[in-house]
Amino acid sequence: MNDGPQIDADHEAADHQHDSDGDDHRHEHDDHHDHDDHHEHDVETVGVAVVTISSTRSLDDDPAGDAVVAAFDEAGHEVVTRQLVDDDFDGIQATVDNLVDREDVDAVVTAGGTGVTPDDVTVEAVDDILRKRLPGFGELFRRLSYEEIGTRVVGTCAAAGVSRGVIIFCLPGSENAARLGTEEIIVPEVPHLVGLASRDGEE
């Protein structure tokens, strides 16, 4: 008496499995399509402003800033300005805000002030001018950093976001961290991010 309904149930289960397989196939196709189109809006040459946040460094003694500049130069992008700002909330915010308004600046990279001391206020200063946050940057940076410094990574607040069509990245002030973030994440992704953020209607 139960054989008939059991056959129907098996048939429905098979149909469901077929539909699921079809969905999986469509998802795989969509993922592949997205990957192919990832660089569709890339900008060929990015104009970059590099800002070192430090009350003790100078531009002549700035290994982190040097590492950032070198990575962009090697990738063929243009560092249009390089500045040094004290560990001061208002000064950092005003500097970055002014850079965002420059026509030749597509991205701003800060180095320093992302730790946990009272003077580390870069992320908080920049956060006030962001219109969109990019949490994936900080998450990936900390994952990569963990491979180098282990659990000490919990003390870094590296962050990124978008302000009026300009991408802003906040990196730690150590040379190794600045090089890691720039070479492994920023340089590969910034042409695409700038292309998307600067599109008409995005802001």
Image: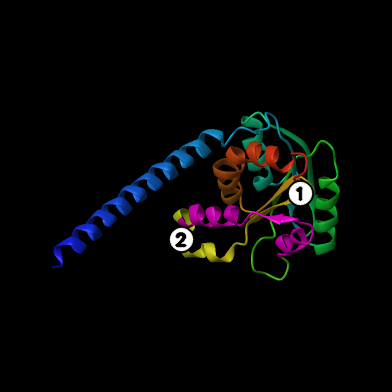
Secondary structure state at the residue bearing disc 1: loop
Where does label 1 land, which residue?
Answer: 58
Q: Nearer the viewer, residue 131 or 4?
A: 4
Q: Which amino acid lies under the numbered mark 1 shown in the image of this protein?
A: Ser
Residue 159, percent across and down? 64, 56
Q: Quadrant of residue 73?
A: top right
Is residue 137 magenta-colored?
yes
Magenta stretch: give its range.
120-146
Principal secondary structure, stretch drawn in magenta: helix
Residue extending farthest to the front is 1
Q: Which amino acid lies under the numbered mark 2 shown in the image of this protein?
A: Gly
Residue 58, percent across and down? 76, 49
Question: Which circle's residue, 1 or 2, is located before the other in the chain?
Answer: 1
Q: Nearer the viewer, residue 164 or 168?
A: 164
At 55% from the left edge and 57% from the top edge, which residue is drawn? 139
- Frontmost of labels 1 and 2 is 2
At 45% from the left edge and 54% from the top edge, which residue is drawn? 147
